[in-house]
């Protein structure tokens, strides 16, 4: 069948027929993202601290982890984990496997961001904390980490949005997230173009929402910013 | 400029609180950074309740001497005793020491993400483990001491330089130190703000706080300090009471005073 | 070797070859389209700024696999049967141009304003000023982040697996399906990706350090 694109008739009727599936896909995508953010951030922050202040063997270990993850594609990491676990007879569903992979992945990127944040804190702050008899751990927790997060927050937001977009390959391990649902719909309707246009629009909206939500979180967590009205 | 609140009262209190064992004792203290020897044998005693002003040209080792006192710099030779602890044997618990020795920096170094009250109470809460109510009372009290009771809920950026420096002083006071070190705490301030900070320090002196301060404010040093120490090339070149500035014994101090006044 | 036959390993390396081909396509296409995007983003004309800004926001808000699908199905509604390489190449071009455009905009704008004014004094036209004064300086700033983004391009070509493009990821998946040795196969694939990406990461960092020192 040959024709020119202009004569192509768009058909969005699948929207009606597959609405529940689409919603399900959206929830799964959002769920994966939200569940991965906090542990991913914690892992990354821990690694940043380990790389900056840990004993040499910890520093080396973290470096290997961070460089290894950042220089290989997420899909390969996901396949490695998911098919690897299957061979080891460990029964893990696609959703937990996806979340584990995302946490490990985003942890490495967060580690680099947080390391930069921690390094950007003026020496005087650390000196002041030490001179007030705070333990290194107290100084980290009350002085360094809060300031580092404030400084690199925009980069963290971008990273988490990227992570949400990256969940779109989890259908490769049969997690029925949004892109997976789209594939299923197009295989029934043969309306691939329309389906993916709609899906693209949904992702756009979701990235905006995620960005706004994370900025809202910042407004609450950094009261100094709110009071002074300085945009992050 | 008469900054000391009441010189007579100050002397009275000092006489009362002063005991014979010095709070700080330098004996032949040496300190090098690599090849560069910055302290070349310092001997100095600071008694309880005493105010000692360190003066001298840039690079003469004043800050280094001060920073040795709370262990920010390790000494290489000699003996240094601070609040009954020996700092030269390397076994001193710095955190323990720093509960007794406060320090105020030229650049304030307040925590920008915390309010004034949180800045002041962070260490007492974490280190002395005081409760929320006690922390609030403590904050009220030390902020009143530096005249900033109304700024408790503000963030450092919302304050002038002089106010920030007073918060930094309050933050030190909140740890109830036996000794406070001041390193050129007014150098970043314009004259008007300098005055308000110096008044706070003078008041603390009058109340009997033991202090070591590095300063370029000669008039202030003369009026507040019990002992002035002129450092030159890593040595104590001359030291004495406030009036030693009027009658310098060495050409170096004469030249320094000539430039400074 | 490691339980894989020579043929299987060769198969994986053939995939790696296509990964490099697609990366180059993405980079070249991304450069060709990304330059005008950067210029438009840094332009003084508001309409150009908004238009290119929308394009960047659009691409950065949609997952690359979805872009691949849209391009893939978009071309095929014309009734054309496209090789996956073409669809993936176009998708990578769109994707890279948005990111490169944004990176380069930053570089153009990082050149101090005074440089424009200096060009004005020399009585150069706008174009001349841009080409002879701004561009050389912007290029210097642009090298480290561009090399860094190359790493992203190489890694992200792996998303082309969703439209069935035969690359390193695809070949590894095929071999895994027939051998059931995921650790061996995907570790090998990961090592190959690493061998391509890591040197570029190191290079990018080294350039960056050199730049910040000067
Ligand atoms: N951490 C360090 N590493 C190397 N050299 C240092 C260090 N700290 C200080 N110095 C050097 O030691 C010397 C004395 O420095 P110090 O800060 O004690 O002088 P100062 O009398 O406080 O001068 P200023 O009035 O400029 O503050 C200077 O030559 C300085 O360059
Ligand atoms: Mg100094």
Image (cartoon, coloured by chain):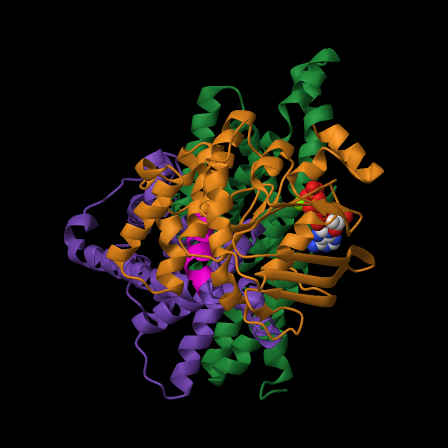
Chain colours: A purple, B orange, C green
Most frequent secondary structure within the magenta stretch: helix
- The stretch of residues the image draws in magenta is A138-154
In the picture provided, is A178 more to the left or to the right than A16? right
**In the image, what residue occupies the spot 32% across and 52% down?**
B138
**In the image, what residue occupies the spot 63% across and 75% down?**
C10
Q: Can residue C12 be found in the magenta stretch?
A: no
Q: Relative to B84, does residue A92 appear above or below in the rendering?
A: below
Expressed as whole percent of the image width and height from the top left, the position of residue C6 reads 64, 82
**For residue B53, what is the image quadrant?**
top right
Expressed as whole percent of the image width and height from the top left, the position of residue A212 reads 31, 43
Expressed as whole percent of the image width and height from the top left, the position of residue B254 reads 79, 34
Depth order, front residue of A117/A175:
A117
**In the image, what residue occupies the spot 61% across and 85% down?**
C5
Q: Relative to A53, does residue C10 appear above or below in the rendering?
A: below
Depth order, front residue of A123/B70:
B70
- Quadrant where the image shows the C terminus of chain B: top right
In the picture provided, is A92 more to the left or to the right than B2? left
């Amino acid at each position: 069948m040959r024709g020119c694109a202009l004569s192509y008739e768009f058909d969005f009727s699948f929207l009606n027929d597959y609405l529940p599936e689409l919603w399900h896909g959206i929830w799964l995508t959002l769920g994966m993202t939200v569940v991965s953010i906090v542990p991913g951030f914690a892992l990354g922050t821990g690694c940043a601290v380990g790389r900056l202040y840990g004993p040499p063997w910890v520093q080396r270990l973290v470096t290997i982890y961070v460089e290894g993850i950042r220089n290989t594609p997420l899909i390969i990491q996901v396949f490695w984990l998911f098919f690897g676990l299957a061979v080891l007879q460990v029964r893990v569903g696609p959703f937990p496997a996806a979340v584990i992979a995302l946490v490990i992945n985003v942890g490495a990127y967060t580690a680099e961001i947080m390391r930069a944040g921690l390094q950007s804190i003026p020496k005087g702050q650390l000196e002041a904390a030490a001179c007030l008899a705070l333990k290194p751990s107290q100084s980290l927790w009350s002085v360094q980490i809060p300031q580092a997060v404030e400084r690199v927050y925009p980069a963290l937001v971008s990273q988490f949005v990227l992570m949400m977009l990256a969940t779109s390959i989890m259908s490769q391990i049969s997690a029925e997230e949004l892109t997976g649902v789209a594939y299923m719909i197009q295989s029934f309707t043969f309306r691939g173009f329309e389906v993916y246009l709609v899906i693209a629009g949904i992702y756009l909206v979701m990235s905006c929402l995620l960005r706004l939500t994370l900025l809202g979180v910042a407004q609450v967590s950094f009261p100094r910013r709110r009071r002074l009205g300085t945009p992050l | 400029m008469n900054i000391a609140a009441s010189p007579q009262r100050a002397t009275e209190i000092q006489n009362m609180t002063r005991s014979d064992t010095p709070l700080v004792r330098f004996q032949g203290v040496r300190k090098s950074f690599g090849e560069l020897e910055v302290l070349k044998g310092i001997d100095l005693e600071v008694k309880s309740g005493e105010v000692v002003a360190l003066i001298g040209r840039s690079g003469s080792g004043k800050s280094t001497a001060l920073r040795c006192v709370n262990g920010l710099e390790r000494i290489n030779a000699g003996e240094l005793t601070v609040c009954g602890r020996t700092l030269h044997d390397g076994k001193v618990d710095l955190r323990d020491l720093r509960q007794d020795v406060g320090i105020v920096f030229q650049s304030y170094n307040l925590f920008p993400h915390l309010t004034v009250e949180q800045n002041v109470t962070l260490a007492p809460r974490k280190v002395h483990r005081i409760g929320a109510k006690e922390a609030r009372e403590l904050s009220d009290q030390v902020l009143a001491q530096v005249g900033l009771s109304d700024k408790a809920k503000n963030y450092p950026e919302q304050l002038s330089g002089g106010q920030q420096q007073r918060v930094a002083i309050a933050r030190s006071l909140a740890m109830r130190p036996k000794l406070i070190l001041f390193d050129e705490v007014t150098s970043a301030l314009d004259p008007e703000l300098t005055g308000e900070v110096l008044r706070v320090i003078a008041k603390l002196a009058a109340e009997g706080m033991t202090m070591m301060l590095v300063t370029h404010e000669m008039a202030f040093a003369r009026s507040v300090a019990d002992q002035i120490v002129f450092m030159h090339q890593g040595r104590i070149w001359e030291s004495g009471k406030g009036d030693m500035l009027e009658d310098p014994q060495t050409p170096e101090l004469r030249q320094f005073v000539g430039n400074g006044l | 070797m490691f339980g894989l036959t020579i043929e299987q390993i060769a198969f994986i390396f053939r995939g790696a070859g296509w990964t490099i081909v697609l990366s180059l396509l993405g980079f070249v296409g991304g450069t060709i389209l990304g330059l005008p995007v950067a210029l438009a983003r840094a332009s003084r004309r508001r309409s150009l700024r908004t238009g290119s800004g929308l394009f960047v926001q659009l691409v950065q808000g949609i997952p690359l696999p979805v872009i691949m699908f849209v391009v893939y199905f978009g071309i095929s509604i014309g009734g054309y049967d496209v090789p996956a390489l073409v669809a993936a190449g176009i998708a990578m071009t769109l994707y890279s141009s948005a990111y490169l455009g944004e990176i380069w905009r930053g570089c153009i704008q990082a050149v101090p304003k005074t440089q424009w004014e200096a060009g004005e004094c020399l009585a150069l036209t706008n174009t001349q000023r841009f080409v002879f004064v701004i561009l050389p300086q912007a290029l210097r700033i642009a090298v480290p982040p561009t090399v860094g983004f190359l790493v992203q391009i190489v890694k992200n070509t792996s998303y082309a697996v969703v439209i069935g493009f035969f690359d390193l990821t695809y070949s590894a998946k095929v071999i895994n399906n027939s051998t059931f040795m995921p650790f061996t196969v995907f570790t090998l694939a990961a090592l190959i990706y690493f061998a391509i990406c890591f040197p570029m990461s190191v290079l990018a960092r080294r350039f960056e350090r050199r730049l910040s020192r000067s």
